[in-house]
Amino acid sequence: MHIVSPAARPRSLSDYDRERAEEHRLLRIEEMRAEVERRDAGLFKAHPRMCPDCGGRLLSKGLSEPVSFVCLAGGFEVRIHRLRCAACGQTTYPIDAEVDRATRVLPSAAEHLVRLVLSAGSYERAAEEAAFHLGIRTCSSTLHRLVATEASQVSDSLAGEAERMLATGECPHERVALAGGDLYMAIDGGHVAARAKGSFEIKAAVAWSGVREVSTGRFELTGREGYAALEPASAFFPKVAALAIRSGALTASRTVVLADGADWIRNGVRDWMPGALYVLDWTHLERRVREVLCRAEDEGVLRSVLAALRRADPHAALSVLRAWTPPHDDRRLYRRLLRYIRVNAQGIANHALVDVHGSGAIEKAVDLIVSRRYKLRGMSWSEEGAAALLPFLVMRYNKTWKSHWDV
């Protein structure tokens, strides 16, 4: 009896494509392994043999055990040269001049991994997507170290310009010369759940010079630049002032600052931007009023107060409110509303001088920089972990991502 085996199933184009891609990936890994070995040998040969810690003499200790490296094609292992100080015993690896020792991730792969961390929603998910999309198998702790290492190398140009401005009086270089046009700025903060207890606030500011239509019904801010930091207002506002100067405040006819009325913002604008026109965001103001005057029988008072505020007349609004008697349960909110209108009276009156009445620009910036990454369900953060991601989120918002990675 003859047994006839079924004909082998012909390979599909998908099978062929996957096989060729895997062959190409493995070939690239071998090429990168050879390149790392070559670079390591060259750096070892050219090393000055002086200990960076104590200045002692470094002696060769041969090749190390296999060390894992990560490139865009995946992971591989290489034995690298090592040197040891005869005086203090510190071990030095010449390859550290090109590849960070904490992660051994090549810069080309680091850019893609950090981008995944920003968009994946969590470090664990980013590790899964790196394995699926890039073929890079790594763990969340490695990604944590990678982000922290790369964040320490990000240059905060605003911080440097603010420091020079305070120390020497040297103004930042204007990125935009407005030549009589208006400069608009908006400032706000986003609260993030803390790992230990409570929350902390990430402060953000955006500067722009105008609006243009990019397609039907779609607009974008022109000359837009944002900044965000996890720091007290006393350290944040010098950078906001530097951002204003860099965005054209010295050549603008006026600088308009929109905010939600928070005390730290109002005081910061007063102290660091004395010539700016402070404008209270209308949406926050109306929400505060409706929160107090929420009963059906308060409709007449509500209309009178809002009409006065729309006329940019805070004193008339206060007069109407003071003549109204709130329910006993709402007296705390009533007193808070009176104070809110009183301390922001100038910001309300300035609505008569501008044609921009809302701080939607900063609300969107806080959403893109803070909320979409730090406020996902169940998330809590340490201040160190949140601060490490922040420079990359700001770079992505400003569309200057390549300025760091192409160096």
Image (cartoon, rainbow, N blue to C red):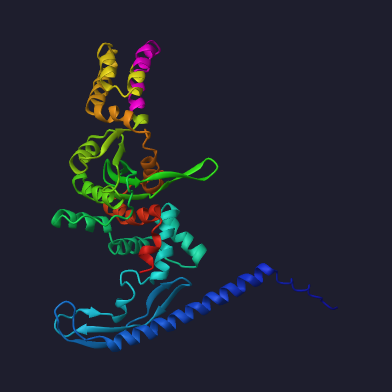
Membership of 295 in magenta stretch = yes
Query: 243 above or below 138?
Result: above
Q: Is residue 100 visible?
A: yes
Q: Quadrant of residue 194?
A: top left
Which corner quadrant of the image does residue 117 belong to?
A: bottom left
Q: Quadrant of the C terminus?
A: bottom left
Above or below, 124 against 328 in this view is below
Q: What's the residue at 38%, 50% (across, down)?
A: 223
Number of marks in the image?
0
Q: Is residue 340 above or below residue 191?
A: above
Dominant secondary structure, magenta:
helix
Q: Is residue 308 left or right of residue 113?
A: left
Compared with 314, 355 (above or below) is: below
Residue that protrudes farthest toward the right in the picture: 1
- Rendering coords of residue 212 (x, y %): 46, 45
> From this viewpoint, which residue is outermost toward the front?
179
In the image shown, does 294 or 350 lie closer to the viewer?
350
Residue 371 visible in the picture: no
Asked where in the image residue 306 lies, by quadrant, the reply is top left
Give coordinates of residue 205: x percent, y percent.
31, 45
What's drawn in magenta, residue-wise? 285-304
Asked if residue 109 lies in the magenta stretch, the reply is no
Which quadrant of the rendered structure holds the N terminus? bottom right
Where residue 137 appears, as percent x and y from the top left, is 45, 67
Q: Nearer the viewer, residue 85 or 6?
A: 85
